[in-house]
Image: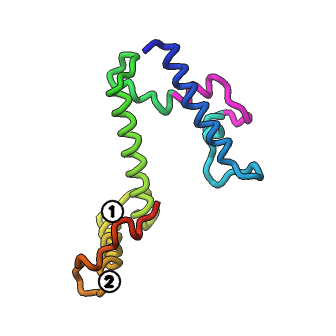
């Protein structure tokens, strides 16, 4: 893929992301506790994003995709990077849910405590076993 095409695609991706962030603001113009993409890209906190800040944000997000360092990103390299980013987000959510003491790490005891809690919730008749009739119906009790 030509360099200009890659820049155009990167620009389109960030522009749509920034546009989504702007639309997500409530009527007061204030955002929730999450920092917007624009705020994250605005490294010098000037209220706007220069090309250098924009390029750094894109490179920070996809810079690791060029696994072999040849200056080109293949479909396989990009797919691998997307998988890595997804796995990292999932792992972060898991640590946030299971990490009782808030140290950012999971211990065997923390994981076992969570497992015991989940088991107790499923074992509705408290007999120490989970039977089919105690299992929630498909989709029941799931958080999104």
Q: Dot 2 surroundings within 10 Å: few (below 14), some, or many (20 or more)?
A: some
Q: Dot 1 surroundings within 10 Å: few (below 14), some, or many (20 or more)?
A: few
Q: How many marks?
A: 2
The answer to which image quadrant residue 49 occupies is top right
**Residue 107's mark?**
1
Residue at 23 percent across and 79 percent down: it is: 131
The answer to which image quadrant residue 81 occupies is top left
* SS label for mark 1: loop
Q: Is residue 90 above or below residue 133?
A: above
Residue toward you, 105 or 117: 117
The answer to which image quadrant residue 136 occupies is bottom left
Tell me where residue 17 appears, x and y as whole percent. Answer: 58, 37
Q: 37 left or right of 131?
A: right
Q: Is residue 29 above or below residue 126?
A: above
* SS label for mark 2: loop
Tell me where residue 13 appears, x and y as whole percent. Answer: 54, 30
Asked if the residues shown at circle 2 and circle 1 are in contact, with their CB atoms under 8 angstroms apart, the answer is no
Magenta segment includes 55: yes
Separation (CA) of disc 2 from disc 1: 27 Å
Q: Is residue 51 above or below residue 131?
A: above
What range is drawn magenta here?
Answer: 44-58
Q: Which residue is mark 2?
A: 124
Magenta segment includes 111: no
Q: 143 left or right of 57?
A: left
Residue at 42 percent across and 15 percent down: it is: 1
* Earlier sequence position, callout 2 versus callout 1: 1
Tell me where residue 68 appears, x and y as whole percent. Answer: 32, 22
Residue toward you, 106 or 97: 97
Tell me where residue 16 appears, x and y as whole percent. Answer: 59, 34
Comparing labels 2 and 1, the label whose residue is closer to the camera: 2
């Amino acid at each position: 893929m030509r360099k200009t095409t890659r820049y155009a695609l990167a620009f389109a991706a960030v522009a749509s992301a920034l546009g989504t962030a702007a639309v997500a603001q409530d009527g007061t113009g204030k955002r929730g506790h999450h920092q917007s993409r624009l705020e994250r890209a605005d490294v010098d906190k000037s209220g706007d994003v220069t090309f250098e800040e924009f390029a750094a944000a894109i490179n920070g997000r996809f810079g690791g995709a060029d696994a072999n360092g040849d200056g080109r990103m293949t479909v396989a390299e990009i797919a691998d990077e997307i998988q890595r980013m997804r796995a990292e987000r999932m792992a972060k959510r898991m640590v946030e849910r299971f990490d009782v003491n808030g140290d950012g790490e999971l211990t065997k005891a923390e994981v076992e405590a969570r497992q015991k809690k989940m088991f107790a919730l499923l074992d509705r008749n408290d007999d120490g076993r989970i039977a089919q009739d105690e299992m929630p119906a498909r989709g029941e009790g799931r958080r999104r």
